[in-house]
Image: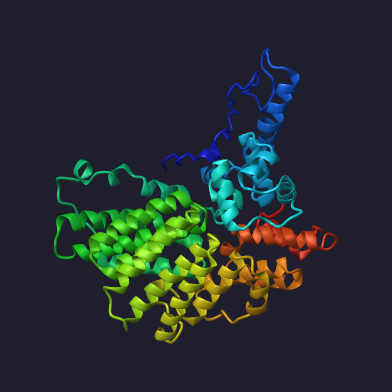
């Protein structure tokens, strides 16, 4: 296997030692970062300040990484800070790494020092998603770094092959068909059998079996490239080849966004939409646009997600039959994802308007369906409404209306709802009910629950709400928190 692509979170995590740049006389290649090497002209107070802001906050993270298993896949999955840290602790870590005081960072986001101090120490609930996006921009980290990356890290190591997915997306053969195209006629796949494999992987995604999807993606992505090669050489089925490639890359983008690989998600979404353009099929393009929305949301680019969603909706509405159930489903889901972007941008008016449009389309459709793996219908509109109200901090609404039957929905949707509902119940102080929802969700799809940052934050809150019983290592809450890497 190729050496996994190294991301910024791998910096200073090699087993052979930790290499540090010289900063005011501080240098080290030793196992203990921050040890002085040689003399410095800096004053003791200056050196201490540098250590406090730059060196000491990183020691815990470095030591955590150095103790990680030797498997390259496990190293890839260890993304900087430990999963057990809260959002507030992550903000504090990256603030210190940037060299900002609490007063400076609070001023940059228009809040008080007291507000930030309470966020960092857990005495105040985490900021809304739009504020987290602004903090990530100022701190120059990804939104996922502050939320806590949703890393796929199950017991079955064979299903944690994210580096292989990266290799498939970043193969140099994808850069130029002219340079890498073979002059010899080769046997290339046909689109029909590949389409069956892709739809099977989509079913795994909706069933919450993310490990199976990740395991299948490297081969599917390579085959999609071969289908594109076939489309360039043969006229007969080229549109079908492009359509299947678009569906493959859409699946990759959506899955990668779900597990926190936001940059790769964007790359896959771009490939999906390029292939969809070439397919000349409006439904394929509309479906692929959903992957772009997922990737933009994962990267905290809410204005861009709004623009993509609105543009796609206008384009699709003028090109499809009004009573086509597939078109209704795709257009409805585009409205729902765009509504989420508006809510995360704290634009209630736009979010409400888009929900109303989706609601009308669901009424026209008449029932919960699953065309193009949308799961679209009246129930999905309701689930998105609840999720949006949670993003808008309307916890009371979610608690009052969140107890609905989702057993008939695709597991990915039903589990996502239970996670949102549990979060609202926890914020409302209903810890027992919140934990009950999380347990049902975990039984439905362990991978979706154990790798979700919102679940970790909720479990940490539940432990705080019941420090004697909930915080006991023998308690069910604490055991689940360990499974989900919410605590050490």
Question: Which residue extends farthest right?
Answer: 468
Above or below — where is 97 with respect to 49? below
Q: Residue at x 52, y 81 (%)?
A: 408
Q: Which residue is drawn at 64% across and 42% down?
A: 105
Which is nearer the eye, 38 or 31? Answer: 38
Q: Is the N terminus in the top left, top right, bottom left or bottom right quadrant?
A: top left
Give the image location of residue 276, x and y in percent.
29, 62
Q: Is residue 336 visible?
A: yes
Question: Which residue extends farthest bottom?
Answer: 366
Give the image location of residue 39, x and y in percent.
68, 12
Total of numbered circles in the picture? Answer: 0
Left or right of residue 203, residue 452 in this image? right
Q: Which residue is drawn at 68% across and 43% down?
A: 92
Give the image location of residue 297, x and y in percent.
48, 58
Q: Quadrant of residue 107?
A: top right
Which is nearer the eye, 278 or 411? Answer: 278
Above or below — where is 203 with respect to 49? below
Which is nearer the eye, 446 or 43? Answer: 43
Left or right of residue 452, residue 160 in this image? left
Give the image location of residue 35, x and y in percent.
69, 23
Coloring scheme used: rainbow
Q: Quadrant of residue 153?
A: bottom right
Left or right of residue 481, residue 347 in this image? left
Left or right of residue 78, residue 274 in this image? left
Q: Can residue 85 be seen in this view?
A: no
Above or below — where is 383 with respect to 277? below
């Amino acid at each position: 296997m190729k050496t996994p692509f190294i991301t910024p979170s791998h910096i200073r995590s090699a087993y052979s030692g930790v290499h540090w740049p010289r900063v005011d006389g501080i240098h080290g290649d030793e196992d203990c970062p921050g040890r002085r090497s040689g003399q410095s002209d800096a004053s003791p107070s200056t050196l201490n300040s540098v250590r406090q802001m730059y060196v000491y906050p990183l020691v815990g993270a470095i030591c955590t990484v150095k103790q990680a298993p030797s498997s390259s896949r496990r190293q890839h999955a260890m993304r900087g800070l430990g999963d057990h840290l809260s959002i507030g602790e992550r903000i504090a870590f990256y603030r210190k790494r940037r060299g900002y005081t609490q007063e400076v960072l609070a001023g940059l986001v228009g809040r008080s020092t007291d507000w930030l101090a309470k966020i960092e120490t857990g005495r105040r609930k985490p900021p809304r998603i739009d504020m987290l996006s602004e903090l990530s921009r100022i701190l120059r980290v990804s939104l996922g770094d502050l939320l806590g990356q949703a890393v796929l890290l199950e017991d079955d190591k064979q299903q944690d092959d994210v580096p292989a997915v990266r290799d498939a997306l970043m193969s140099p053969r994808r850069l130029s068909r002219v340079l890498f195209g073979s002059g010899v006629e080769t046997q290339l796949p046909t689109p029909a059998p590949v389409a069956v494999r892709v739809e099977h992987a989509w079913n795994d995604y909706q069933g919450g079996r993310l490990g199976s999807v990740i395991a299948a993606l490297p081969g599917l992505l390579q085959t999609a490239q071969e289908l594109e090669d076939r489309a360039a050489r043969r006229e007969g089925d080229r549109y079908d080849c492009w359509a299947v490639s678009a569906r493959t890359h859409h699946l990759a983008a959506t899955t990668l966004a779900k597990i926190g690989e936001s940059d790769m998600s964007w790359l896959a979404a771009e490939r999906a939409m390029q292939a969809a353009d070439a397919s000349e099929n409006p439904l394929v393009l509309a479906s692929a646009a959903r992957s772009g929305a997922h990737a933009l949301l994962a990267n905290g680019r809410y204005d861009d997600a709004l623009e993509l969603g609105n543009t796609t909706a206008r384009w699709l509405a003028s090109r499809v039959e009004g009573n086509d159930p597939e078109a209704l489903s795709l257009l409805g889901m585009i409205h729902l994802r765009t509504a989420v972007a508006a809510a995360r941008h704290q634009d209630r008016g736009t979010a409400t308007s888009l929900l109303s449009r989706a609601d009308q389309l669901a009424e026209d459709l008449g029932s919960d369906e699953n065309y193009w793996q949308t799961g679209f219908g009246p129930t999905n509109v309701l689930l998105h409404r609840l999720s949006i109200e949670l993003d808008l901090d309307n916890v009371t609404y979610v608690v009052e209306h969140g107890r609905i039957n989702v057993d008939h929905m695709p597991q990915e949707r039903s589990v996502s709802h239970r996670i949102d509902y549990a979060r609202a119940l926890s914020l409302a102080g209903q810890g027992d009910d919140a934990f009950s929802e999380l347990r049902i969700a975990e039984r439905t799809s362990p991978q979706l629950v154990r790798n979700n940052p919102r679940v970790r934050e909720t479990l940490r809150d539940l432990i705080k709400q019941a420090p004697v019983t909930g915080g006991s290592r023998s308690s069910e809450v604490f055991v689940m928190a360990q499974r989900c890497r919410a605590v050490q």
